């Protein structure tokens, strides 16, 4: 391929003379740039994925040289190579760098046609446990809803090892749809402007997110382990469809596969963008300290949410909830999880990274708590219905594990029986929360859950304005005694620190995402001790 291009250039140049040769060679090396920064992810003890994307005016393939070094000045190079990319993969570059040393920090950069990328920093995982591990846990980064101050806050820290992104890394909506009311004022109008449906749409949306300065800062600084939630595809997706997908938008499988291809092109996850690959559940090992099990509660095996209007009626919803065949993970992923939990007994912690809330959250009677005169994302009739149904105290959000109570009981049973110290991480709900996970009310916890709030997506308080300050939050806490912490107001991120003795969650909340000037505060700190998960969070 390269040889043919060279001969073509040479034959044109011979007819132009030497000055022409210089022009042709300049032309044959189109100007390139790295507008989307660099990223790394899916580290193991010996390998890590490094990623970038080349911007070029011409649709011809380009060669991208890459280097990995022990030092930031890129003098002590330990691995290098060349990656050819082109239009078939949207000019993304993804290299699985192998044969690295365990537990080391590395630096990496790319070069294309004389242009150098910025230098990124990444690391491999330790083979044996040593000291503490510190992870930033994030979810729900919605570009038009605000600035990615959370990413900036994470990039500014110098004590983190890894970012765990639990999904909703992008959102599919167009201008005028969900969470875009401030987009124009913030100069964060979604690209393309409409809802994304095709491969070029999903690619353009990923490109917009990756070009964000705060996203670039975080990715250049730390490796990421990412799983998708629903909005990488469409709202409330499940294995055969999504709430925000209908037939006049084409087939679900075609849309899902377009989204998958763009995801595997644009994310530093292991795996190539081909063949409608839906398997993303996978394990990482932090020496003997932790087994990190990342799950997919969305695409791989989830049955349709039992919401009235899906395949259930008001009369049959109770029966649907008790249907043992309605699964969240699907049989294959459940078997994989059980196997991994059994084999994780040589690690102190089992960190279960997944998307949706596990703890039960029954609503309080909302009638005395809600300010009906305050603005809400709910229309008045919706609010009437929400308030009326809150009086039953039965869980109302059925897109989370509460909508799959039989599968949830099996999940908790497996955690209790097979894991030594399970800590479940979740996102998706735009709420900061911590809970003891019990199989039956009053039981000892079998695991604990730490939920990170959104990077920018609207938080629950925008739906449930309180009559008294924190009235709704306090009502939810009173109704659900296993919840140990709840914040429904703020954006932020969760810092998880693991040592041989304890696992600590620190909820860092921001005062704003509507200005680049922000403050971050430590709002809550809770720990669970190794060997004492039954005592819960303190
Ligand atoms: Fe979200």
Image: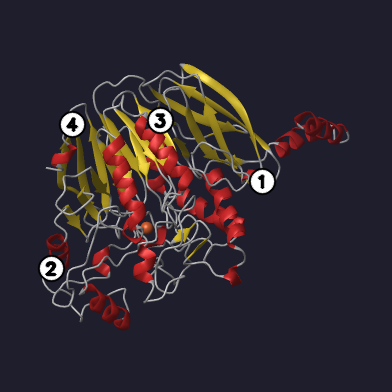
Indicate the secondary structure of the residue bearing disc 1: helix
Structural distance between the alpha carbons of marks 2 and 1 = 53 Å
Give neighbour class at mark 1: few <14, some 14-19, many 20+ (Cα, 10 Å).
few
Residue pointed to by mark 3: 121
- Closest to the observer, 358 or 243: 358
Quadrant holding the N terminus = top right
Q: Is residue 112 above or below residue 307?
A: above
Give the colouring mode of the picture.
Answer: secondary structure
Residue at image point 15% right, 73% down: 369
Residue pointed to by mark 1: 87
Question: Of marks 1 and 4, which one's residue comes earlier in the chain?
Answer: 1
Disc 2 vs disc 4: which is toward the camera? 4
- Closest to the observer, 376 or 83: 376
Structural distance between the alpha carbons of marks 3 and 4 = 35 Å
Question: Of marks 3 and 1, which one's residue comes earlier in the chain?
Answer: 1
Q: Is residue 385 above or below residue 82?
A: below
Structural distance between the alpha carbons of marks 2 and 3 = 44 Å
Indicate the secondary structure of the residue bearing disc 2: helix
Residue at image point 44% right, 40% down: 335
Q: Quadrant of residue 292?
A: top left
Residue pointed to by mark 4: 531
Indicate the secondary structure of the residue bearing disc 4: loop
Q: Is residue 11 visible?
A: yes
Question: Of marks 2 and 1, which one's residue comes earlier in the chain?
Answer: 1
Indicate the secondary structure of the residue bearing disc 3: strand
Q: Position of residue 538 (x, y in %)?
A: 11, 42
Question: Of marks 3 and 4, which one's residue comes earlier in the chain?
Answer: 3
Give neighbour class at mark 2: few <14, some 14-19, many 20+ (Cα, 10 Å).
some
In the image, the residue with mark 1 has its CB under 8 Å from the nearest atom of ligand 1: no
């Amino acid at each position: 391929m390269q040889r043919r291009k060279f001969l073509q250039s040479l034959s044109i140049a011979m007819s132009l003379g030497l000055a022409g040769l210089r022009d042709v060679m300049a032309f044959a090396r189109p100007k390139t740039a790295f507008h989307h920064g660099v990223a790394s992810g899916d580290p193991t003890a010996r390998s890590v994925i490094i990623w970038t994307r080349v911007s070029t005016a011409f649709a011809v393939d380009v060669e991208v040289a890459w280097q990995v070094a022990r030092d930031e000045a890129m003098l002590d190079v330990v691995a290098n190579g060349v990656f050819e990319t082109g239009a078939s993969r949207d000019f993304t570059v993804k290299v699985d760098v192998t044969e690295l040393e365990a537990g080391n920090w590395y630096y990496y950069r790319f070069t294309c046609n004389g242009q150098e990328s910025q230098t990124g920093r990444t690391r491999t995982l330790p083979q044996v446990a040593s000291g503490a591990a510190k992870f930033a846990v994030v979810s729900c980064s919605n570009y038009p809803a605000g600035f990615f101050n959370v990413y900036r806050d994470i990039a500014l820290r110098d004590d983190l090892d890894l970012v765990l992104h639990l999904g909703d890394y992008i959102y599919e909506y167009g201008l005028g749809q969900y969470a875009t009311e401030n987009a124009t004022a913030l100069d964060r109008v979604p690209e393309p402007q409409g809802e994304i449906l095709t491969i070029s749409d999903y690619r353009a949306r990923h490109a917009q997110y990756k070009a964000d300065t705060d996203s670039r800062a975080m990715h250049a600084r730390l490796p990421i382990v990412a799983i998708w939630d629903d909005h990488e595809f469409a709202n409330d997706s499940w294995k055969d469809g999504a709430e925000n997908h209908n037939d006049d938008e084409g087939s679900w499988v075609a849309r899902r596969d377009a989204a998958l291809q763009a995801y595997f092109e644009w994310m530093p996850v292991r795996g190539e963008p081909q063949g409608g690959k839906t398997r993303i559940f996978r394990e990482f090992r932090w020496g003997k300290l932790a087994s990190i099990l990342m799950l997919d509660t969305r695409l791989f095996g989830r049955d349709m949410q039992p919401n009235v209007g899906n395949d259930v009626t008001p009369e049959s919803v109770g029966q649907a909830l008790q249907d043992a065949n309605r699964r969240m993970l699907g049989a294959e992923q459940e078997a994989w999880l059980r196997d991994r939990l059994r084999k994780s007994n040589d690690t102190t912690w089992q960190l279960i990274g997944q998307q949706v809330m596990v703890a039960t959250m029954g609503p309080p009677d909302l009638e005395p708590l809600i300010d009906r005169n305050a603005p809400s994302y709910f229309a008045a009739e919706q609010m009437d219905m929400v308030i009326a149904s809150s009086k039953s105290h039965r869980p109302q959000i059925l897109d989370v594990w509460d909508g799959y109570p039989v599968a949830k009981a099996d999940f908790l049973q497996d955690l209790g029986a097979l894991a030594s110290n399970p800590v479940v991480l979740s996102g998706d709900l735009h709420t900061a929360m911590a809970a003891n996970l019990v199989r039956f009310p009053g039981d000892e916890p079998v695991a604990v859950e730490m939920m990170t709030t959104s990077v920018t997506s609207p938080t629950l308080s925008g739906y449930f304005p309180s009559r008294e300050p924190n009235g709704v939050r306090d009502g939810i806490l009173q109704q659900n005694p296993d919840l140990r912490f709840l914040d429904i107001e703020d954006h932020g991120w969760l810092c998880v620190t693991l040592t041989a003795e304890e696992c600590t969650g620190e909820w860092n909340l921001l005062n704003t995402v509507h200005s680049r000037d922000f403050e971050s505060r430590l709002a809550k700190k809770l720990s669970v001790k190794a060997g004492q998960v039954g005592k819960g969070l303190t």
